[in-house]
Image (cartoon, rainbow, N blue to C red):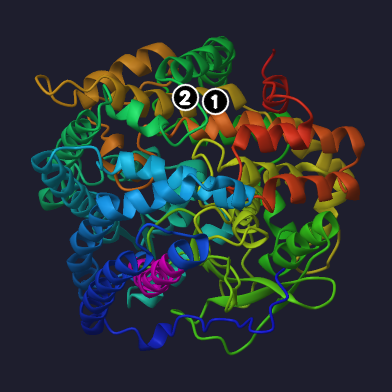
Amino acid sequence: MNDNPLLQFEKLPPFAHIKPEHVEPAIDWLLAENRRRIAALLDEVGEHPTWHNLIEPIEEWDDELERAWSPVSHMNSVVNSEELRAAYNACLPKLSEYATEMGQNERLYQAHKRLSETADALDEAQRKVLENALRDFHLSGIDLAPEQKARYKAISQQLSQLTSRFAENVLDCTNAWEKHITDETLLAGLPDSALDLAAQTAQQRGREGWLLTLDFPSYHPVMTYADDRALRRELYEAYNTRASDQGPHDPKYDNSAIMEEILALRHELAQLLGFANYAERSLATKMAGSTDEVMHFLDDLADRSHPQAQRELDELREFAASLGHDDLQPWDVPYYSEKLRQQRYSISQEEVKPYFPETRVVPGMFEVVSRLYGVSFQEVEGVEAWHPDVRFYEIREPNGQVRGQFYFDLYARPNKRGGAWMDTCQSRMVTHERCQIPVAYMTCNFTPPVGDKPALLTHDEVETLFHEFGHGLHHMLTRVDYPEVSGISGVAWDAVELPSQFMENFCWEREALDLFSGHYQTGEAIPEEMFQRMLAARNFQSAMMMVRQLEFSLFDFRLHREYDPARGGRIYEILDEVREQVAVIRPPAWNRFPNGFSHIFAGGYAAGYYSYKWAEVLSADAFSLFEERGVFDRETGQSFLHNILERGGSKDAAELFRAFRGRDPEIDALLRHSGIAA
């Protein structure tokens, strides 16, 4: 780290003092100030740009804007309210307009271009910053005619608003549905933990009995354990018709028209920039070289996985029939799968939950990371956050120096977006005047503590936590000083899942498992025979899971690759074709999964959902080196730290992978880890 004597740490966001009515005026002021400052800077720099007189000041101003907007955007996801949502949405088009304006600023582009011609005076990461910046100018429409630039700007603004509305409809629709139950016999089969949560939810909302919701900690146990088939079907229908014209929902939440608008605008934007379709535009910032390469990758995985997936489903049908049920429907699959898993391996997620109290998992995960990379973790009390459940930690070097910080928000609650994610609070940045350490938001939606019990996690949830923490480590352990390529910034999107999926592997290694597991009442380690049953069941229905992910990936990629303005999105036509190719379970005609597919319609995965599988090849191959040398082999851990985590986006992902692994990635480890024959 830079030893400049002027180094200082920036203050963290004052969450409690962020008032919705102050958001828009603050953003307005910052945007106007940045416009003024950049215009003055370009006058001053003239024909002689340097890193110090051009890039550093802009980095500072961009960072100031990010640190103002980041907590607002984050709170909109985790403590959503009408007032905050209105302020957030009012700012989106202004931020989009500003970003496009900067991307189409001819004087700014020429200054970057002139600086790039002095590349010999720059370090490797600085050259990468400039290379990415020049690419992004072109992707922002710098080469377009004036009327096309104006259209590009209008499209960008519309897309920012439409994707936000998509996410809001899914959240509101999820929050609006509930199932109130007063007859406990309807909940037969549910484990005590699910019953306790349903009772606690009812009590919190002033109701008697039990309350089921579409939040995952409530929905998942019903689908997996409820004996009442009608109840399973009711929840399946409610969940899989969210934000659509089907099911029990208010039509005001229907995302159908929004999806068509998003696809049309993305296609138009891609063609403005000279791409044939939005899938081509998407690959401009990814590892994959062409849309054909992505399709071949996905088709190849499908060909390898589908026969085994079909056998797995046939086994499940036979098993269900042996229990007197010969009409297997999608809402039956998780239920009978869990029963088959228990019969075959004598193991269930509920059986292992007592061994994964969150109070043991979190410090144990920190210990895993400490052994790999030599850092330590310390909780900091009294740091202001957006909810009482949120905790705050520091990552420290062996000499005690703070390297990164993060917020942990682990539990599901109303008005919080579902799923799990890591997001940037602030990025690492070192300038002549100061050093800013990276800070992350770590968000999950686990079942909260019930009564006097700690939160108990399923093994799947432990994997989710490790996955998101892998993203966090990528962001926080970076050694790159420039925010455009530090941490996860500037990393090819189809490689950004490498550190997250890599971390999941430690959830299956006994040496690591013993650090983050232990019975919540006795502290007893997971018995060896139970662990062996877990391992035996690890790849249960893995091919069925593989083809489900490939269904999502192929649907997303084809949707953006094959868009035809004359025919519209053909959303369900393409989905049916993809399911015909890869799916073994065919959902009912009224299933409206795409209407809630936030990853591609409201997140960063448009024409990029394949990235999960692409990066899984990288992560499995990377972990295979630890399998060869030892799970906690320090030299290998340090190599992964130095070649992958610390380097961020400062070098192409393929080069960084080769530096760590000594060769290009191979698919064999993924197939082996997935239990699919090579």
> Does residue 382 appear to the left or right of 606 in the view shown?
right
Q: Quadrant of residue 199?
A: bottom left
Quadrant in which the C terminus is drawn: top right
Q: Position of residue 488 (x, y in %)?
A: 55, 52
Q: Amino acid at mark 1?
A: Met
Report the residue at 73% width, 75% height from top: 3
Q: Which mark is residue 98?
A: none
Q: Which portion, as a residue range, is magenta?
A: 57-76
The correct choice, above or below, for 193 with respect to 227 in the image is below
Report the residue at 33% width, 68% height from top: 76
Q: Which mark is residue 546?
A: 1
> Does residue 356 appear to the left or right of 488 in the view shown?
right
The residue beneath circle 2 is 550
Q: Is residue 209 visible?
A: no
Q: Position of residue 664 (x, y in %)?
A: 70, 24
Q: Quadrant of residue 491?
A: top right
Quadrant in which the N terminus is drawn: bottom right
Q: Position of residue 586 (x, y in %)?
A: 36, 21
Q: Is disc 1 placed on a helix, strand or loop?
A: helix
Q: Is residue 74 magenta?
A: yes
Asked if labels 1 and 2 touch by Cβ distance under 8 angstroms, the answer is: yes
Q: Amino acid at mark 2?
A: Leu
